[in-house]
Amino acid sequence: MTRYLMTRLFYFFLALLVLSVVTFSLNWLFPGDPLTNMSGIRDGQAAYNATLESRAFDSTVIQQYVNYLAHITQFDWGLSLSTGNDVWQDAATYLVVSAELVLLSFALAVLIGLPLGMLAANYFRHNLDKFILTSAMTGYSIPVFWLAQLLILLFAVQIEWLPITGQINPLYAIDSITGSVIIDILLSDSQYKLAALQDALLHLVLPVLTLSSLPSMLLLRITRNQTIEVLQKPYVKAARARGLSQKRLLFKHALPNVLQDVLPQMTFIFGLMMANLVIVEHIFNWPGAGAWLLKAIIERDYPIIQMVLFTLMGLILVLNLLVEIYRGWRFPMTREERYGGY
Amino acid sequence: MSKQSIIVTALTSFLLLSCSEQTQVPEPLQDGLIYCSEGNPESFNPQRVTSGTTVDATASQLYDRLIDYDAVQQSFVSALATDWQALDNGQRYRFHLRRNVTFHDTDYFTPSRYFNADDVVFSFRRWLDSDAPYHSVGGGFYPFFAATGLDQLISQVQKVDPYTVDIILTHPDSSFLANLATDFAIILSKEYADQLASNRQRELIDKRPIGTGPFKFVAFKKDYYIRYQRHESYWRQGPSIERLVFSITPNANKRMLKLVTGECDVIPYPLVSELKSLNRKEIEVRSEVSPNVSFWAFNTQRPPFDDPRVRQALSYAINREAIIDTIYYGNAELAESILPPTSWASSDAELKYHYNPEKARKMLREAGIPRGFKMDIWAIPVQRVYNPNARRMAELMQSDLAEVGVDARIISYEWNTFRRRLSRSEHDTVLIGWYADNADPDNFFRPLLSCAAVASGSNRANWCHNGFDQILYQAISTTDNAQRKQLYHSAQQLLMQQQPLLPIAHSMRYQAQREYVKGVELPPYGGISFRLAGKELPAQ
């Protein structure tokens, strides 16, 4: 296990290092002054010369990279080129806003995908299976931006149930402290907490639904296929022959084995959600990191672009690492597969 | 029941609960109003900008001026100044100030005194006097005052006593009061500025603003919202709503959707034709003929456009009625002159340049223009109130011109490049326009067609006519309106003869709102005002 752990950690830090080299070289690939792209301080500003020194721009590229690493490990991503604010300070709330949206969508995706996938597998080749699979295929093929428009037209314009933009009606005057609207409402001293909470939940429905559509359908298909495969294994047949109920068979015997293969797909699904996050946040005016990144790209705010790219990709790497460690610990076979020994 | 199904049931029931209890409108929504503005303000001080978006978010909400302009009565009315006199043959204006006017009391500033002459002197010196400590805060550019020449016109602002101020001009100028009544000539708090200066936080003056206006500033989140709270001790009738939010929504389609779903109460620049086709009775579309004009300017320093006959001939070649129908969908008025018909100085002159390709062709041959003559039409690449689609307009004109044997090429660059090359006079002709800042007719003539404007680059026709300049100068030197009207009539006559540009349309300005919103009128000049805003929600 130690060897497995060490190797995983080694690869993780290697990937992070490569990622930082990429973001570092972006400063040169973006047009303009590399130092300005990196620090957000323009030539002619008072702090320019000091920055020149602290970023080692009078020295070699290697030295500059080392200094860059030193800065980003202290979360110093420079200043925004459009607002002049410290990028990391601004980032905190944007990231929490997105985290709330992603976690809720992910939870919904798991709640939809896993049970339906197992249900479909249980009724393999029956009509129910065909129905679920067809719906999943349809859901899977609808592009996110189009689905968002359809949902808006149906639930907001036609039947007027749901709002379409932002986290909450701004008239509630809930101050953004953490970024997560639900936590912010609970922290606020507003006299209308319940109404505000209700409003915020209504605002959450459409973005969460849209963002979870693709991952839930993917999960559904993976779960179904894995379950079918597992259910045809000899040990399942043997268990069935011993008279185990189908329910016990599914949940006690098949599910853990299905999860073993579904789990690694989670990181892939998480990466996919990151890509869709940008679109969903833009469409629903969600004040999160995805919309922030898009805005920064349009405004060519390079310090922000670097920081958000690095953080989102870093998060995917972290999740990947956690899943691998969990698998290695929970399913020793994984370790054996990779290294032929414990 | 398994754990999963409990969670699912709990989640669904909570959502259903949220959906079902919509009958009662919670209090914060009853006394608040959401305006979906089209962009971020650049600053919270209109002195420093000319963009309409910033003016909308600041001028009438946070601040007051010395005097206001009443568009209905077409006269100046008192605001922070109760009355005023012109002395010394119009070279000195004396303003008597209103007493007991309070500045905003916020969590970052508590005023200890009422508004007085010190605030007026401070506010004017901010843009007038390059030695004033606050002049250079935020860059030291005050484009409106530079463009109108107000910073050259005013020689001094003097405090006579705590409630009297004298403004001394270098020469008499009858457009002076009109410029004072614009959204840009707002009054700041000197006490707040002093407090910031002693804390070494001068730059905050335009970020956390303090004024005397009907709303006070609460918070601004770039790209998302600006929040305001009612100024409870406002000196005149204020709004009945308590909270005002500008929800920043640059996309026109999304603004319309948000109005439909009720997330906006009022929106600017709606997609009029699409909104009307939705046919919802709870949404009202309002319009106002606004003081703007779109025109086709000829670069009169380039042959053959230096010949008035050519300019007249080309003017006859354009079918402007068709343009009004296709580009403005009929939401505009055909322009007879650059001065809109709502101005007091507009003349009822007959429309001279009726569409007449026959006559145009004949006049072009007389002027010696060969068949197949090639020229450029520059079309602005952005949407403006006065011209929603200049490229399409240029295409229509291209086919009109082909009728009379002129081969026109359409040119369009990115907006900043476009303006730069335009001010270097690289164009043959250009489709552009003008939007007035104040009610004075002078605002349409001097910035657009005077010889001085050729030098400053805002005279798109590069047309410098000494006789015309003479008339404009006479017109601003007198305060007698009847005489001024006479002078502007002759100026318009001269323009029609010389035709340095062809006026095309005065377009309407639109705003859409939910029917329960009251008191949010479209002002003919300047930015939107929520001073009298209220809501009349249907009884529950």
Image (cartoon, rainbow, N blue to C red):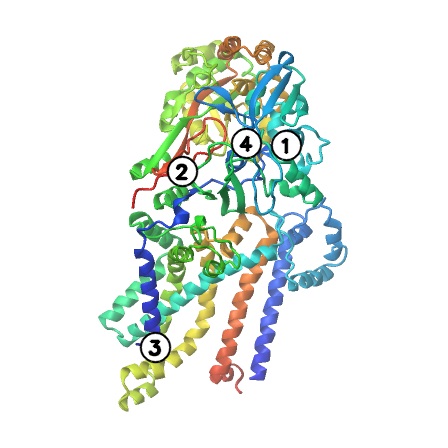
Q: Quadrant of residue A136?
A: bottom left
Q: Which residue is mark 3?
A: A227
**N-term-proximal mark, 4 vs 2:** 4
At label 2, which amino acid type do we have?
Answer: Gly
Q: Which residue is mark 2?
A: B534
Q: Residue at x 59, y 68 (%)?
A: A15
Q: CA distance from mark 3 to mark 1?
A: 77 Å
**N-term-proximal mark, 1 vs 2:** 1
Q: Which residue is mark 4?
A: B64
Callout 4 crowding tier (Cα within 10 Å): few <14, some 14–19, many ≥20: many
**Residue B90 seen anywhere in this rendered image of the structure:** yes
Mark 4 vs 3: CB contact within 8 A = no
Q: CA distance from mark 1 to mark 4?
A: 12 Å
Q: CA distance from mark 1 to mark 2?
A: 30 Å
At label 1, which amino acid type do we have?
Answer: Asp
Which mark is nearer the camera, 3 or 2?
2
Mark 3 vs 1: CB contact within 8 A = no
At label 3, which amino acid type do we have?
Answer: Thr
Image x and y of residue B246, in percent? 47, 42
The answer to which of B36 and B357 lies nearer the viewer is B36
Mark 1 vs 4: CB contact within 8 A = no
Q: CA distance from mark 4 to mark 2?
A: 20 Å
Q: Which residue is mark 1?
A: B119
At label 4, which amino acid type do we have?
Answer: Asp
Image x and y of residue A167, in percent? 44, 54
Question: Which chain is indicated by disc 1?
Answer: B
- Is disc 3 on the same chain as disc 4? no
Dot 3 lies on which element?
A: helix
Q: CA distance from mark 3 to mark 2?
A: 61 Å
Q: Quadrant of residue B537?
A: top left
Callout 2 crowding tier (Cα within 10 Å): few <14, some 14–19, many ≥20: many
